[in-house]
Image: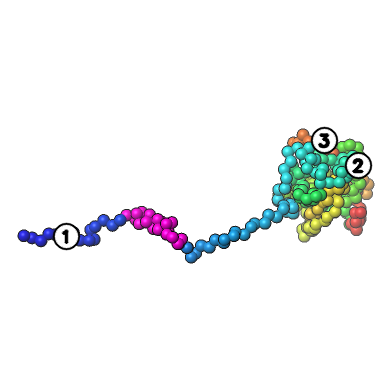
Amino acid sequence: MAPPQHKPLSNFNSPPDFFLAALSLLYLFTSPKPFKFPFLSFPKYPRRVRKIPIMSFSHSQSNLHSFATPQSLSDWLKPRLPSDSFASWGVKPGTKNIHNLWLELSEGETCLADSSPPIRTVNVVTVRILGKNNQILVESRQELSDGSVRKRWRPLAEKMKANETHEEAVVRAVKEELGFDGNTVRIVPGSYNKKVEEGSSNSYPGLPARYVVHSVDALVEGLPDDDGEFCTEEAEEYADFSAAAEALCVKRHYWRWVSSDFIPS
C-alpha cells in the first residue's frame, strides 16, 4: 500500500493581509500600555496662540470691523470718542461727517483699529508736480459741497484704495483732481519715498490718525504754466453708494505754482 501523500506547506493559503492588519490594530488599542510612536510627540498642555489685534498697518489688510450702514458706524464710534469732538463732525468748517468715514471704509481707503479712541490708518499718495523755473504745483484751497472752504497749501494728495500701488494712485489722483489722463503723467525715476506720520485728524476731530505717506515727483503735460491760480472740478466720488448724497465732497480745487523750496505749513 502506497504511503499517503502530503501537500507541501508552501501550497497552504496564508492569512490575507487585511486580516493581519486588523490583528495589529486590535493589539494597539487593547494593550494595557499604549504604544508610543517614537516619531510623534504631543505636548501635554498645548501652547496657546496669542491673538494680535489687527491695526491695518499694511494697506492690503482688511478693516477690523465691517459696518453695514453709517448709523452702525456711528453707534460704534460714539462711546469711543470725546462727545464734543464727535458732535463737531460735518458741523465745524473743514470737517467731514460720519457718511464720509463710512464711505472711506467701504472703499478700502481707511482702516480703523479696535481701541479707545480708534486709530484711523490711511495710505496717502503725495505728488510733487514739477513745473518750469524750479516750481512745484500746490493746492491752495478746496471748495466743499456745503460751500465751505478748506485751506490746503500742499502738493496734490489722494487717499489710496485697497491693493492699489502708488503708481496707480498717482495716475488716478491726476485724473480725478486735475482732469488729465494717465498718458500725460510721468513719475520721476528714483523720487519715490515712504514715511509714516501720526497725529490728529483735521477731517474727523478727536480721531487719531496714522498716515502712511507715499510721495513721488512727477511731470504732467498740459497744465497751465502761468503764475496765476487756476481751478479744476473734481469728478463725482462714491457714485455707487447712496450714502454719498449725505457726505461732504470736494467740488473744486484751486492750484498755484510756487517755488520748489516751499514747505507747506
Question: Distance between the Cα atoms at labels 3 and 1?
Answer: 101 Å
Q: Where is residue 151 in the image (x, y as percent from the top left)?
A: 91, 46
In the picture, the quarter occupied by the C terminus is bottom right
Q: Is residue 183 left or right of residue 20?
A: right
In the displayed structure, 2 sits above or below 140; it is below
Asked if residue 93 shows in the view, the reply is yes
- Residue at the limit of the structure toward the front, as seen here: 32
Circle 2 sits in a helix, a strand or a loop, which is it?
loop
In the displayed structure, 104 sits above or below 211; it is above
Task: Tell me the kind of residue under disc 3.
Answer: Glu
- The quadrant in which residue 144 appears is top right
In the picture, the quarter occupied by the N terminus is bottom left
The majority secondary structure of the magenta stretch comes to: helix
Task: Tell me the kind of residue under disc 1.
Answer: His
Q: What label does residue 92 carry, if any?
A: 2
Question: Distance between the Cα atoms at labels 1 and 2?
Answer: 109 Å
In the image, the segment drawn in magenta is 16-34
- Residue at the limit of the structure toward the left, as seen here: 1
Q: How crowded is mark 3: few (under 14 residues within 10 Å), some or many (20 or more)?
A: few
Q: What label does residue 246 carry, if any?
A: 3
Residue at numbered disc 1: 6
Q: Residues within 10 Å of mark 1 (few under 14, many from 20)?
A: few
Label pair 1/2, CB-CB below 8 angstroms:
no
Say which label, 2 or 3, has the lower sequence index: 2
Label pair 3/1, CB-CB below 8 angstroms:
no
Circle 1 sits in a helix, a strand or a loop, which is it?
loop
Circle 3 sits in a helix, a strand or a loop, which is it?
loop
Say which label, 3 or 1, has the lower sequence index: 1
Q: Where is residue 131 in the image (x, y as percent from the top left)?
A: 87, 53
- The quadrant in which residue 242 appears is top right
Q: In this view, does 169 lie to the left or right of 134?
A: left
